[in-house]
Image (cartoon, rainbow, N blue to C red):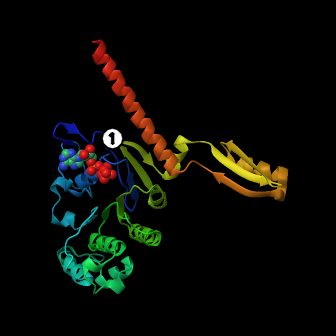
């Protein structure tokens, strides 16, 4: 993807499998929204090949669009409508594309997103968290095969966030493939089957949170106490080490903890390595120009 003479996406290549939850991570300006907008058919790519549900999104027709659900970063329209009223109105658009699961029954949908009590409320009166759940209801009303969620939980309190995570798991269990962006690494770890890290327009990592963490750090840190003294040891095989500990100390061990690098540690390391590599490349390029 090129804006003017600036390339903002240069190496984005991945495949989503049916029913998978993919989380797209990356620093501000990495190109996440641009990537999602291309996949949604909102933005025309400058080059490259894209297939979404078997079609090129730049040419996706109405029946293709009916299979795709979208929750944008912010959406403030229709504030005078009431919650049930707007969902019923929107569900009519899907009648022409109805299947045994499409569109959602509005009452069932209100239960699924936890907005039954607000069914008769004006959209403008919803709290931030309720509004976001309403946005999700709008995104999934057509019971999409593929759902895009751009920073769905920004501004949520911890309880709303947890409820939302349950909802995402339910939607995914229902065979909907989900591509989600977030800046919350804890959320990414909880939701993702696979994580994609996008940095400077390139996907620099693609794998489960566990696999990415192991790529960066093969060592686990084991902490324990014996007779009130605290110990720490780094090891590649935590299970064998802990087995040895119990063999030596039996039940005098307390406060046992095994900790691997967190997704946050891994993410920061990968992004810094990538950025340092780019700096090094820029310096090399500069010295080549300077010496020529
Ligand atoms: N319409 C546009 N014209 C020119 N440049 C743009 C346009 N939209 C985005 N960009 C640039 O493309 C790059 C990627 O932007 P994008 O919004 O996709 O990033 P992002 O990863 O979603 O960022 P954030 O985490 O801040 O939402 C940025 O450098 C941005 O300034």
Residue 32 visible at all: no
Q: Nearer the viewer, residue 100 or 66?
A: 66
Label 1: few (<14), some or many (≥20) within 10 Å?
A: many
Give the answer, above or below, for where 8 lies relative to 263.
above
Vertical order, 273 against 121 (above or below): above
Residue 96 placement: quadrant: bottom left
x, y percent for residue 99: 26, 75
Q: Nearer the viewer, residue 230 or 211?
A: 230
**69 with respect to 4 (left or right):** right
Quadrant of the image for the C terminus? top left
**Ligand 1 has an atom within 8 Å of the beta carbon of the residue at disc 1:** no
The foreground one among 231 and 125 is 125
Q: Is residue 272 above or below residue 70?
A: above
Query: Looking at the rendering, which quadrant does residue 83 occupy?
Result: bottom left
Under tag 1, what secondary structure? Answer: loop
Residue 136: quadrant of the picture: bottom left
In terms of depth relative to the viewer, which is nearer, 66 or 8? Answer: 8
> What's the residue at 47%, 44% (across, down)?
268
Q: Residue 134's spot in the image, x, y percent?
A: 31, 74
Q: Quadrant of the N terminus?
A: top left
Can residue 9 be spotted in the picture? yes
Task: Name the residue at 48% across, 41% down.
Answer: 269
Left or right of residue 106, residue 162 in this image: right
> Eyeballing the image, is 215 above or below 41?
above
Residue under label 1: 200
In the rendered structure, the answer to whether residue 200 lies left or right of residue 1 reads: right
């Amino acid at each position: 993807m090129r804006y003017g003479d600036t390339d903002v996406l240069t190496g984005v290549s991945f495949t989503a499998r049916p029913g998978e939850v993919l989380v797209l991570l990356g620093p501000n300006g990495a190109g996440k929204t641009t990537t999602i907008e291309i996949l949604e058919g909102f933005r025309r790519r400058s080059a490259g090949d894209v297939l979404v549900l078997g079609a090129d999104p730049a040419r996706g027709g109405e029946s293709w669009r009916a299979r795709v659900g979208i929750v944008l970063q912010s959406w403030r329209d229709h504030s005078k409508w009431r919650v049930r009223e707007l969902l019923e109105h929107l569900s009519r658009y899907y009648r022409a594309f109805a299947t045994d699961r499409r569109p959602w029954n509005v009452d069932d949908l209100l239960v699924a997103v936890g907005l039954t009590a607000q069914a008769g409320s004006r959209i403008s009166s919803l709290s931030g968290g309720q509004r976001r759940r309403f946005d999700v209801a709008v995104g999934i009303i057509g019971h999409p095969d593929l759902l895009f969620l751009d920073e769905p939980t920004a501004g949520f309190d911890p309880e709303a966030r947890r409820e939302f995570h349950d909802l995402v798991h339910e939607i995914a269990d229902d065979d909907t493939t989900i591509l989600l962006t977030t800046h919350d690494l804890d959320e990414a770890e909880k939701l993702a089957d696979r994580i994609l890290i996008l940095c400077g327009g390139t996907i620099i990592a693609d794998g489960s949170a566990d696999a990415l963490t192991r790529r960066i750090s093969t060592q686990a840190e084991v902490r324990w106490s014996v007779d009130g003294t605290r110990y720490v040891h780094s090891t590649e095989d935590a299970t064998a080490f802990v087995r040895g500990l119990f063999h030596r100390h039996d039940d005098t061990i307390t406060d046992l903890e095994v900790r691997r690098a967190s997704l946050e540690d891994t993410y920061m390391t990968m992004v810094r390595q990538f950025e340092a590599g780019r700096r090094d490349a820029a310096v090399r390029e500069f010295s080549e120009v300077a010496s020529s």
